[in-house]
Amino acid sequence: MIVYGGTAAAGAVEDGARYAFATNSWTTLPAISPGNPMPRTKHSAIWTGTEMIVWGGSSSASQLNPLNSGARYHRANNAWSLTAPGPAGRASHACCWTGSEMIIWGGAVPGGSPGIVVTLNDGARYDPAGNAWTTMQGTPPLGRSEPATLWTGTLFVVWGNSPNEGGAYSPERNNWQPIALLNAPTPRLHGSFVWTGTQGIYFGGADLALGPISSNETWAYTPARFLHLYARP
């Protein structure tokens, strides 16, 4: 297990460590090139099968200072390398690994006034083999931070976290398609979304229609609709 960054008592941090289950011990990660990437929290991190890629986030835990930098930790040689410059910096964005690329989408940036946060609805794909980014095209869903997302094997699906709408992005076509809203969950924050191999299962979250109040509803997503599987007050 590899951990990196986050928030400590003094603010955002830039260190990390590996935990080995076999020996029940930790090994500190080496330092990244000085100054880049800097300490960060609310960033994304994925495992490719051979390396961990860290990207974006905020350099401060007390205020939103979005980053557009990243780095790759190579487990085999215990070393870091920097990613190519990416899209506009952001924090609390969605991220997934497709098997060959990292997709980042959405997130939050500061607004024009103190305390105002703007959510984004753009994104990009990062190819580690070529160390290059590709901008996502098409008409994406509404902007949001910390959305529920999943990877189906062919589609990157975004849903919820306030608006009860979403979209499915195809890297092959480099395009978005809307998700049907018929019988969809009510708007909610921080629901869980996982792919079973045939369906996306969406559970819980803070239901905004109820106050918000935590929900224990379960929904199943198919390519064309949501199915309400189970709910109780």
Image (cartoon, grey):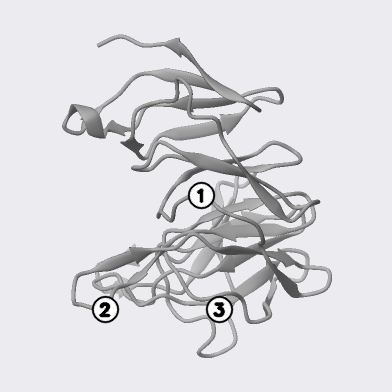
The numbered dot on residue 69 is: 3
- Residue at 41% x, 54% y is 144
Up the image or down, 172 lies above or below 184; here it is: below
Q: Give x and y (percent) for residue 111.
A: 29, 73
Q: Give x and y (percent) for residue 173.
A: 78, 52
Up the image or down, 133 lies above or below 188; here it is: below
- Give the alpha-carbon distance from disc 3 to disc 2, as whole Å: 22 Å
Of residues 21 and 172, the one nearer the viewer is: 172
Which residue is labeled 1 in the image? 141
The numbered dot on residue 112 is: 2
Q: Farthest residue in the bottom direction?
A: 34
Question: Mark 3, residues whose alpha carbon is within 10 Å: few (<14), some, or many (≥20)?
Answer: many
The amino acid marked with disc number 1 is: Pro
Which quadrant of the figure contains the C terminus?
A: top left
Tell me if 218 is positioned left or right of 114 in this view: right
Q: Give x and y (percent) for residue 85.
A: 63, 82
Image quarter of residue 39: bottom left
The amino acid marked with disc number 3 is: Ser
Tell me if 39 is positioned left or right of 153 in this view: left
- The first of marks 3 and 2 along the sequence is 3
Question: Mark 2, residues whose alpha carbon is within 10 Å: few (<14), some, or many (≥20)?
Answer: few
Image quarter of residue 5: bottom left
- Give the alpha-carbon distance from disc 2 to disc 1, as whole Å: 23 Å
Q: Give x and y (percent) for residue 214.
A: 26, 28
Question: Mark 1, residues whose alpha carbon is within 10 Å: few (<14), some, or many (≥20)?
Answer: many
- Give the alpha-carbon distance from disc 1 to disc 3, as whole Å: 25 Å
